[in-house]
Amino acid sequence: MTRNDTLPVVFLSILLSISALLNAQKKFTSEEYIQQYKEVAMEKMREYKIPASITLAQGILESGSGNSLLATKANNHFGIKCHKGWNGAVFHTDDDEKNECFRAYNKPDESFKDHSLFLTERPRYAPLFTLDIMDYKAWAQGLSKAGYATNPRYPELLIRIIERYDLHQYDHLAMKKKIIVKKPVDKIEDHNFIPINPTEFEVVGKSSKGRYIHENNRRKLIFALEDDQIKNLASEFAIYSWQIVKYNEFDKKEKLKKGQIVYLEKKRRRSYTHDTHVLKEGESLHAVSQLYGIRLKRLYKMNHIYETPKAGMELKLR
């Protein structure tokens, strides 16, 4: 083989080495981790009655979203040590002590299964299975009390992960419970509103017809008058009817009522003036979203609501 003949081979070798190095350095995000393992977490929830949200949150926390040494070298996503009676493969690395023994698996799915068995077969975790399977906060606290981790902030860390990535949705999906992510109701008559004195909101201008324009949560609004219609308001304020419908999350055939808040701009993602609202009997989330100038979908997401909310529930507004 001549010198020139060896060049393509050397070049290919370099490319393969670079590719291998890049793959070795690839880090998974938490979002990618969730997409990769949400199905197995839900499967284990149905089989072993452990919330999928808890399993995913523990996996993210214990394995650094699949990037830890244990996860990459031993497929161990939950930091489970060998313990007495383990006859499978092992992996040694420093942890609380030097050269500790951890369980090793052929693939990540085996780690998820062993995590479920680990919790279901050990008496100290038995109290967990008396808890509501949909109560991830109680499960997070229960794991800590049972001694799963030594970090006193372990429950807080799990709950933060669950709420940040909305992992509770997978509990509902696993148990095939209906998830409400948009409007709490579909019927026009259920779009009630919470009466409020217009003087509560600052006046920031007038329309061409002399109607006062108010501001709430840094968004302009008006109060509907008797016989107001969306198309007439659109004409008065030089915007389209569909914009009023969209900004207020109205039904297309919404019939306005006297005193009802109508936003002229898209509502905010959170309140800038209030922290919470206690839901009263007869109030809909749509009414609350209008009262505080917050998008309805954001109210659902901030409060992790998957079922029709009940009176007395304290809603986070930011």
Image (cartoon, rainbow, N blue to C red):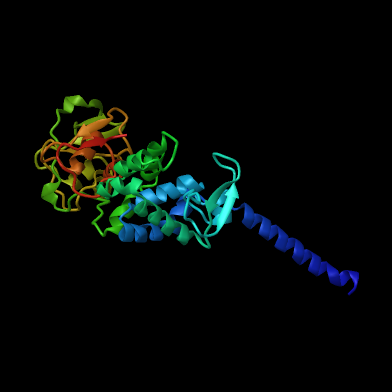
* Percent of width and height locating residue 14: 76, 61
Query: Considering depth in this image, is 297 or 248 the residue closer to the camera?
Result: 297
Residue 27 visible somewhere in the drawing: no
Query: Residue 310 is drawn in which quadrant?
Result: top left
Residue appearing at x 46%, y 48% in the figure: 60
* Percent of width and height locating residue 114: 43, 57
35 on left or right of 70: left
Residue farthest left in this picture: 226
* Percent of width and height locating residue 36: 46, 58
- Quadrant containing the N terminus in the rendered view: bottom right
- Quadrant containing the C terminus in the rendered view: top left
Residue farthest bottom in this picture: 1
Seen in the picture, residue 188 relative to 176 is either above or below; the reply is above
Across the whole image, how many numbered discs are drawn on residues? 0
Query: Considering depth in this image, is 295 or 120 the residue closer to the camera?
Result: 120
Residue farthest right in this picture: 2
Residue 189 visible somewhere in the drawing: yes
* Percent of width and height locating residue 2: 90, 73
Query: Considering depth in this image, is 115 or 286 the residue closer to the camera?
Result: 115
221 on left or right of 123: left
Query: Considering depth in this image, is 179 or 66 the residue closer to the camera?
Result: 66
Query: Residue 248 is drawn in which quadrant?
Result: top left
